[in-house]
Image: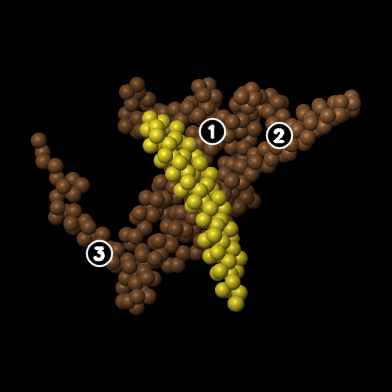
Chain colours: A brown, B yellow
Amino acid sequence: MSEKRGCLGCSFPLAAGILLVFVVLFALGFAAGPLGKSIFGDLGLPGWLSVSRPDPRLPAETVFHLFGFPIANSIIAAWITIVVLVGLSYAVTHRMRLIPARLQAVFEAFLGWLYDLCREVAGEENGRRFFPMVATIFLFVAFNAWLSLLPGFGSLFVIGPEGGHVDLLRGANTDINMPLALALVSFIFVEYFGLRSGGVRYLGKFVNVGKFITGAGQIARGRLRAGLGGLVTGVIDIFVGILETLSELVRIVSFTFRLFGNMTAGEMLLLIAIFLVPWVFALPFYGLELLVGFVQALIFGGLTLVFLTVATAPHGAEAA
Amino acid sequence: MTPEAVKMLAIGLTVGLGMLGPGLGIGLIGYSAMQALGRNPEARGPIMTNMILSIAFAEAIGIYVLIVAIILAMIV
């Protein structure tokens, strides 16, 4: 039986050596970055050790024009995500075996977990129906977020249409139009599934004039007290219906800003961390960005799932 | 006070006061989730799922505050 080696599997001198390299890089970065420059003054370290000041611009910059449409750098990143996802799907499924190979096993485990989540939240047959939607949104958002961490995003320049330097690639989730598009798609699908499962009665949730009209009818027939009661409850119902409509619409805004804000804040955090201490300091923030990308994708998909479930809930459940 | 000072005050106060709510909210959600987990460790799955969901809603409010601060910082 081999003896267990300490220090995460490496021998002690190797681990100490690696730690030393990290400390030296961190010290170099600290000295060359703006923090070190303000504390120690200009030590004359070579220029390539420091990073230029980040210039985050909120709207995504146009790279070129295609048939009259301005193509922004986040759209190019979204295309790359699409190519990666399609390529991965092809690689996983073009030679599927009953006992899966490694890549297929990873994706089976992951999609199986997502499918179980859909079935657990939405029930058996609804879970099966909602799964493609939820999984697409999840995979798209997650891969957008993760691919934007690769080198090349934010460091490759081209000459833009106005002549200035423009980044070639930028994370697709940091352009506000992409989360907005996803939120609109999610909204449309929630309404579609709600209408399909509930019929026109689904709209009765928003335009709730039933009790009001009954109350008015009772007053017209002369029964004042019952009519007045119906009228008051009817007014409250109409108000609640308006609130429900508003809350559906605000959901779009909330989805958009949640995803956009998290991704843009993460991008700015990384830029500033790399600017302050150019070398080792940004590693924990990369880990944080990986986690945040996964969590935001899960939240977008999971919330879509929850709203779909609520929209397709049978009408009688509310009476309970 | 100079306009630059007022602008910095505005941005700082926006983020500082605005993040109080979501921070407290997420703490409360975590507290109740821990209590529920302590009472019934077998219900870990649903508890964690609902906790993550609620935390997402609360955090979104904090993100709105951040967006407002970024917009304020960009309007010179």
How far from the left and from the top, in percent, is residue A124?
Answer: 50, 22
Q: Nearer the viewer, residue A176 or B52?
A: B52
State the quadrant of the N terminus of chain B: bottom right
Q: Quadrant of residue A215?
A: top right
How far from the left and from the top, in percent, is residue A75?
Answer: 54, 48
Say whether disc 3 or disc 2 marks the residue closer to the N-terminus: 3
Q: Evaluate whether label 3 is on the same chain as label 1.
A: yes
Q: Sort mark 1 into few (<14), some (14-19) or many (20+) by Cα contacts within 10 Å.
A: many
State the mark number for residue A305: 1
Give SS at disc 2: loop
Q: Sort mark 2 into few (<14), some (14-19) or many (20+) by Cα contacts within 10 Å.
A: some
How far from the left and from the top, in percent, is residue A251?
Answer: 61, 42
Q: What chain letter is assigned to the residue under label 1? A: A
Say whether disc 2 or disc 1 marks the residue closer to the N-terminus: 2
Q: Evaluate whether label 2 is on the same chain as label 1.
A: yes
How far from the left and from the top, in percent, is residue A225?
Answer: 83, 29
State the mark number for residue A206: 2
State the mark number for residue A24: 3
Q: CA distance from mark 3 to mark 1?
A: 48 Å
Which amino acid is tagged 3?
Val
The residue sitting at 61% across, 30% down in the picture is A311
Q: Nearer the viewer, residue A284 or A250?
A: A250
CB under 8 Å between discs 3 and 2: no
Give SS at disc 3: helix
Name the front one of labels 3 and 2: 2
The residue sitting at 41% across, 40% down in the picture is B34
The residue sitting at 70% across, 26% down in the picture is A201
The residue sitting at 18% across, 57% down in the picture is A17
Which amino acid is tagged 1?
Leu
Q: Quadrant of residue A20?
A: bottom left
Q: Is residue A121 above or below residue A239?
A: above
- In the image: residue A255, left or right of residue A116: right
